Amino acid sequence: MLKSILMVWLLAQDLALTQVAYEDYLGYRAVDEGVMSAELAGAIARPQLAGRRFVTLVPRSGPQVGIRIVQGGQSGFEPMRRVGWSAVELLVQDPASLKEGLDGSAFRHLQGPDFLTDQKNILAMQVTGPDQELFYLTHMIDPTQSFLQPQPNPEPVGHTFIMVMGSTDITASVAFWQQHFENGVVGPIPYRIGVLSEAYDLPLETEHALALVSMADGYGIEIDHYPESAAPVPAPEGQQGGVILVSLSVDPRTLKVPLPWELAYHDQDGGLRGGVVRLPSGAPIEVAFTEAVLPAPAD
């Protein structure tokens, strides 16, 4: 079972400038730094990122879902023009005030704040960050009325609670989660996604198929059906950016079938602790098991 989102990995053209923007305008704080290993870079089909510096930031309080910024973004990146991970959705307290507070920053307003449903329970806006990374900034008025019920965050800008991904085959993408995990799925259903329509020069009233996978801790994965013209991942040289990896907490006791590892993590006793898996869209996830899976005893 999918439990929660642990980390979002995204590329920055200038690591230091992006860090400052997140600290000054999102209120995040740095908690660690390091370099990407060659093994992980290879497993996510981005070997050029081996040895690249990263810094991890989290909200100052509340649930500590990390955003790990990795040096390696490129100026030709365009959000939502490729399949795979496309947007980071953060819980925020007041999108309208936040919109004003981002004036003059490296964040660019795209749309909203607007209510997403007729019930007027979810108010959201969309912005891009210093490296054209796409954020949905969302206020849930009453989480108990929603399919997802994340823990509230006391900060003006809180933690990631939904990761958005695009696929040109939403049926295959949904089937992957249903094949491996016991989590609930809603959809696919038709839904207007303004930033997606704009990215492909489609009328704003265009409806796109959308599905939502729920997690035990109130988090979720949104899967959007992209036009056939969406490019594959990873992007070619000069166009790399955005979210490159999402780390998820998983209870291995409820897996329906084994995961197809690109890279497996083992502890000193040989127990399987998780690893890296490639989704049908080509986007990778990093899985962290809540407990090790010990190898079967020899006969």
Image (cartoon, grey):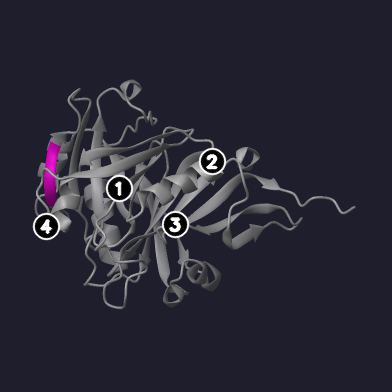
220 or 31, nearer to the observer:
220
Q: Disc number at residue 281?
A: none
Residue 157 can be seen, yes or no? no
126 sits to left or right of 256 = left
- Residue 62, placed above or below residue 174: above
Give whichever of discs 2 and 3 has the lower sequence position.
2
| Residue type at tag 2 | Phe
User: Mark 2: which secondary structure?
Assistant: loop
- Overall secondary structure of the magenta section: strand
175 or 235, nearer to the observer:
175
User: Mark 3: which secondary structure?
Assistant: loop
Instruction: Estimate the spatial distance between the alpha carbons at disc 4 and disc 2, rounded to whole Å.
Output: 35 Å
Instruction: Estimate the spatial distance between the alpha carbons at disc 1 and disc 3, rounded to whole Å.
Output: 13 Å
Give whichever of discs 4 and 3 has the lower sequence position.
4
Image location of residue 196, percent across then percent down? 20, 51
The residue that mark 3 highlights is: 280
The residue that mark 2 highlights is: 181
